[in-house]
Image: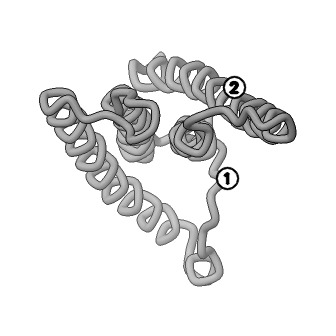
Amino acid sequence: MNVFTSLYRLVRILAQAMNYISGVCVLAMMGLTCADVVLRLFRYPIPGTYEMVGFLGALAVSFALAKTSLERGHIAVGFLVQRVSPDAQKQVDRINALVLSALFGLISWYSLVFALASHRNHEVSMTLQMPIHPFIIGISACFAMLFIISTLRFILSFEPSEKEEL
Protein backbone atom coordinates (compact mmCIF):
# COMPACT_ATOMS: atom_id res chain seq x y z
CA MET A 1 0.00 0.00 0.00
CA ASN A 2 1.21 3.44 -0.94
CA VAL A 3 2.07 5.96 1.80
CA PHE A 4 -0.07 8.58 0.08
CA THR A 5 -3.05 6.24 -0.02
CA SER A 6 -2.69 5.65 3.72
CA LEU A 7 -2.44 9.38 4.28
CA TYR A 8 -5.56 9.86 2.18
CA ARG A 9 -7.50 7.48 4.44
CA LEU A 10 -6.38 9.49 7.49
CA VAL A 11 -7.41 12.73 5.76
CA ARG A 12 -10.87 11.27 5.09
CA ILE A 13 -11.29 10.50 8.81
CA LEU A 14 -10.13 13.99 9.79
CA ALA A 15 -12.41 15.60 7.20
CA GLN A 16 -15.37 13.69 8.61
CA ALA A 17 -14.49 14.89 12.13
CA MET A 18 -14.22 18.46 10.84
CA ASN A 19 -17.61 18.06 9.21
CA TYR A 20 -19.10 17.09 12.58
CA ILE A 21 -17.54 20.19 14.14
CA SER A 22 -19.19 22.20 11.38
CA GLY A 23 -22.53 20.66 12.26
CA VAL A 24 -22.04 21.49 15.94
CA CYS A 25 -21.34 25.11 14.96
CA VAL A 26 -24.57 25.25 12.95
CA LEU A 27 -26.52 23.79 15.88
CA ALA A 28 -24.93 26.29 18.24
CA MET A 29 -25.85 29.14 15.88
CA MET A 30 -29.43 27.91 15.76
CA GLY A 31 -29.69 27.43 19.52
CA LEU A 32 -28.15 30.80 20.29
CA THR A 33 -30.37 32.61 17.82
CA CYS A 34 -33.53 30.91 19.08
CA ALA A 35 -32.62 31.58 22.72
CA ASP A 36 -31.92 35.23 21.91
CA VAL A 37 -35.28 35.64 20.12
CA VAL A 38 -37.20 34.03 22.99
CA LEU A 39 -35.34 36.03 25.64
CA ARG A 40 -35.96 39.25 23.71
CA LEU A 41 -39.67 38.67 24.28
CA PHE A 42 -38.94 38.98 28.02
CA ARG A 43 -36.61 41.95 27.44
CA TYR A 44 -33.45 39.95 28.24
CA PRO A 45 -31.54 39.63 24.96
CA ILE A 46 -28.26 37.74 24.96
CA PRO A 47 -25.40 40.24 24.54
CA GLY A 48 -23.05 39.47 21.67
CA THR A 49 -25.39 37.08 19.86
CA TYR A 50 -24.76 38.69 16.49
CA GLU A 51 -21.01 38.51 17.09
CA MET A 52 -21.05 34.85 18.15
CA VAL A 53 -23.29 33.83 15.25
CA GLY A 54 -20.80 35.49 12.91
CA PHE A 55 -17.87 33.61 14.40
CA LEU A 56 -19.76 30.32 14.42
CA GLY A 57 -20.86 30.85 10.83
CA ALA A 58 -17.27 31.36 9.70
CA LEU A 59 -16.24 28.18 11.52
CA ALA A 60 -19.20 26.20 10.16
CA VAL A 61 -18.33 27.05 6.57
CA SER A 62 -14.58 26.54 7.05
CA PHE A 63 -14.87 23.18 8.79
CA ALA A 64 -17.25 21.88 6.11
CA LEU A 65 -14.85 22.65 3.25
CA ALA A 66 -12.61 19.58 3.62
CA LYS A 67 -15.44 17.04 3.42
CA THR A 68 -17.03 18.95 0.56
CA SER A 69 -13.74 18.94 -1.32
CA LEU A 70 -13.22 15.21 -0.79
CA GLU A 71 -16.73 14.47 -2.07
CA ARG A 72 -16.24 16.92 -4.94
CA GLY A 73 -19.43 18.56 -3.72
CA HIS A 74 -18.41 22.01 -4.88
CA ILE A 75 -19.86 23.63 -7.94
CA ALA A 76 -17.67 23.05 -10.96
CA VAL A 77 -17.95 24.28 -14.49
CA GLY A 78 -17.69 20.97 -16.25
CA PHE A 79 -19.41 21.59 -19.55
CA LEU A 80 -16.17 22.84 -21.11
CA VAL A 81 -14.02 20.00 -19.78
CA GLN A 82 -16.57 17.32 -20.76
CA ARG A 83 -15.98 18.10 -24.43
CA VAL A 84 -12.32 17.06 -24.38
CA SER A 85 -10.72 13.61 -24.19
CA PRO A 86 -10.38 11.73 -20.87
CA ASP A 87 -6.60 12.29 -20.94
CA ALA A 88 -7.10 16.04 -21.33
CA GLN A 89 -9.66 15.96 -18.50
CA LYS A 90 -7.11 14.26 -16.27
CA GLN A 91 -4.53 16.92 -17.15
CA VAL A 92 -7.01 19.70 -16.32
CA ASP A 93 -7.78 18.03 -12.99
CA ARG A 94 -4.07 17.69 -12.27
CA ILE A 95 -3.36 21.36 -13.03
CA ASN A 96 -6.42 22.39 -11.02
CA ALA A 97 -5.20 20.38 -8.02
CA LEU A 98 -1.76 21.98 -8.23
CA VAL A 99 -3.13 25.53 -8.46
CA LEU A 100 -5.59 24.89 -5.61
CA SER A 101 -2.81 23.40 -3.51
CA ALA A 102 -0.74 26.56 -3.91
CA LEU A 103 -3.74 28.81 -3.24
CA PHE A 104 -4.89 26.95 -0.13
CA GLY A 105 -1.34 26.76 1.19
CA LEU A 106 -0.98 30.52 0.89
CA ILE A 107 -4.37 31.21 2.47
CA SER A 108 -3.56 28.90 5.37
CA TRP A 109 -0.14 30.43 5.92
CA TYR A 110 -1.30 34.05 5.77
CA SER A 111 -4.30 33.28 7.99
CA LEU A 112 -1.93 31.83 10.58
CA VAL A 113 0.31 34.89 10.33
CA PHE A 114 -2.78 37.10 10.78
CA ALA A 115 -3.91 35.04 13.80
CA LEU A 116 -0.50 35.35 15.45
CA ALA A 117 -0.47 39.11 14.86
CA SER A 118 -3.99 39.31 16.28
CA HIS A 119 -2.84 37.41 19.36
CA ARG A 120 0.25 39.59 19.75
CA ASN A 121 -1.87 42.76 19.48
CA HIS A 122 -4.51 41.42 21.89
CA GLU A 123 -7.31 41.97 19.39
CA VAL A 124 -10.75 41.17 20.78
CA SER A 125 -14.32 41.27 19.52
CA MET A 126 -16.25 44.49 20.04
CA THR A 127 -19.14 43.35 22.22
CA LEU A 128 -17.91 40.33 24.14
CA GLN A 129 -14.26 41.40 24.29
CA MET A 130 -13.37 37.84 23.29
CA PRO A 131 -10.02 37.10 21.59
CA ILE A 132 -10.47 36.54 17.87
CA HIS A 133 -7.23 34.67 17.14
CA PRO A 134 -8.59 31.19 18.05
CA PHE A 135 -11.25 31.54 15.36
CA ILE A 136 -8.68 32.62 12.79
CA ILE A 137 -6.42 29.69 13.74
CA GLY A 138 -9.38 27.34 13.21
CA ILE A 139 -9.97 28.78 9.77
CA SER A 140 -6.26 28.50 8.99
CA ALA A 141 -6.31 24.82 10.00
CA CYS A 142 -9.23 24.21 7.66
CA PHE A 143 -7.36 25.72 4.74
CA ALA A 144 -4.30 23.66 5.70
CA MET A 145 -6.50 20.58 5.36
CA LEU A 146 -7.63 21.78 1.92
CA PHE A 147 -3.95 22.22 1.02
CA ILE A 148 -3.26 18.62 2.05
CA ILE A 149 -6.26 17.32 0.10
CA SER A 150 -5.29 19.20 -3.06
CA THR A 151 -1.67 18.11 -2.78
CA LEU A 152 -2.68 14.47 -2.30
CA ARG A 153 -5.07 14.75 -5.23
CA PHE A 154 -2.22 16.06 -7.38
CA ILE A 155 0.25 13.35 -6.26
CA LEU A 156 -2.24 10.50 -6.59
CA SER A 157 -3.21 11.67 -10.09
CA PHE A 158 0.12 10.29 -11.30
CA GLU A 159 -0.57 6.76 -10.01
CA PRO A 160 -1.50 4.35 -12.81
CA SER A 161 -4.34 2.68 -10.93
CA GLU A 162 -6.31 4.79 -8.53
CA LYS A 163 -8.46 2.53 -6.42
CA GLU A 164 -10.08 5.42 -4.62
CA GLU A 165 -11.01 8.64 -6.32
CA LEU A 166 -9.60 11.59 -4.42
From mark 2 to mark 1, how far is it between C-alphas?
Answer: 20 Å
Residue density around tag 2, few if under 14, some if 14–19, many if 20 or more, within 10 Å:
some
- Report the coloring of the rendering: one colour
Residue 117: numbered disc: none
Label 1: state its secondary structure: loop
Is residue 53 something one can see in this rendering? yes
- Can residue 165 be seen by looking at this rendering? no
Image coords of residue 165 (percent x, y): 61, 41
Q: In which quarter of the image is residue 68?
A: top right
Residue corresponding to mark 2: 24
Which corner quadrant of the image does residue 121 belong to? top left
Name which residue type carries label 2.
Answer: Val
**Quadrant (top left/top right/bottom left/bottom right) for the C terminus:** top right
Tell me the residue at 63%/51% (across/down).
72
Residue that badge 1 annotates: 73
Residue at 68%, 24% in the rendered image = 20
Along the viewing direction, whichever of 114 and 64 lies nearer the viewer: 114
Front residue of 118 and 153: 118
> Which residue is painted at 21% across and 41% down in the image?
114
In the figure, 42 relative to 104: above or below? Answer: above
